[in-house]
Amino acid sequence: MTKYQKHFAIIIVVLFMNITDAFAQKSPIYVDDVEINSIENLEYIAMVVVNKGLGTKSKVIVDYGQKINWGSLGNPKIRTSKGGEVKAFNGSLDALNLFYANGWVFVNQSQIEIGLSGIGLVFLLKRK
């Protein structure tokens, strides 16, 4: 393979990677009717995943620095449209994949106690 063929092959690979990244499936993430990817200067978010039991959908709550009523947990849930239905997740990896597709990367994970019988996984995410 000549020097020019190698350079051409590298250029093709780089272009293919950029094209596939451009077509990656992104769906907006709304929290309390705010599309969080549009918030300027937002570097970090906390995603809390609460599982109610085996075989049930997970509740995902997002803290991006907004005021949260932790008693009701009604507002900070994820929606795919403004005022739309709350998005159901199959688990924490399902939610992490949505955030990754929207330009967020995993930083750290911890646990918190929620109520009397619940444990929540808290994922710290950073914008790419």
Image (cartoon, helix red, strand yellow):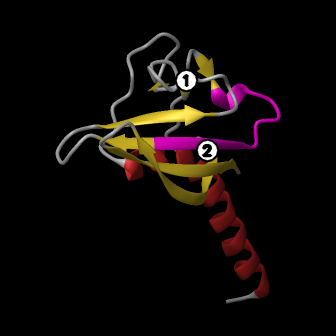
Q: Residue at x 65, y 54 (%)?
A: 18
Query: Magenta residues?
Result: 36-48
| Residue 42 in the figure: left or right of residue 81 | right
Disc number for residue 106: none
Q: Quadrant of residue 69?
A: top right
Question: Label 1 amino acid?
Answer: Tyr
User: Which label is found at residue 30?
Assistant: 1
Judge by depth and name the residue closer to the eye, 83 or 119.
Answer: 119
- Residue located at (68% from left, 64% from top): 14
**Residue 67, position as x, y percentages in the image:** 65, 22
Estimate the x, y position of residue 26 in percent, counting from the top left: 53, 36
Q: Circle 1: is it few (<14), some (14-19), or many (20+) Cα within 10 Å?
A: many
Please identify the residue farthest to the left as the structure is shown.
Answer: 55
The residue that disc 2 covers is 22
User: Compared to 30, does 123 lie above or below?
Assistant: below
Measured from the top left, where is residue 125 in percent x and y?
Answer: 62, 50
* Pointer 2 or 1: first along the chain: 2
Residue type at tag 2: Ala
Q: Where residue 119 sits in the image (x, y, percent)? A: 37, 48
> Disc 2 on helix, strand or loop?
helix
Q: Is 105 above or below relative to 84?
A: below
Give the secondary structure at mark 1.
strand
Image depth: mark 2 or mark 1 in front: 1
Looking at this rendering, what residue extends furthest in the bottom direction?
1
For the point 55% across and 28% down, the residue is 28
Q: Is residue 6 magenta?
A: no
Q: Is the residue marked by circle 2 packed among few (<14), some (14-19), or many (20+) residues within 10 Å?
A: few
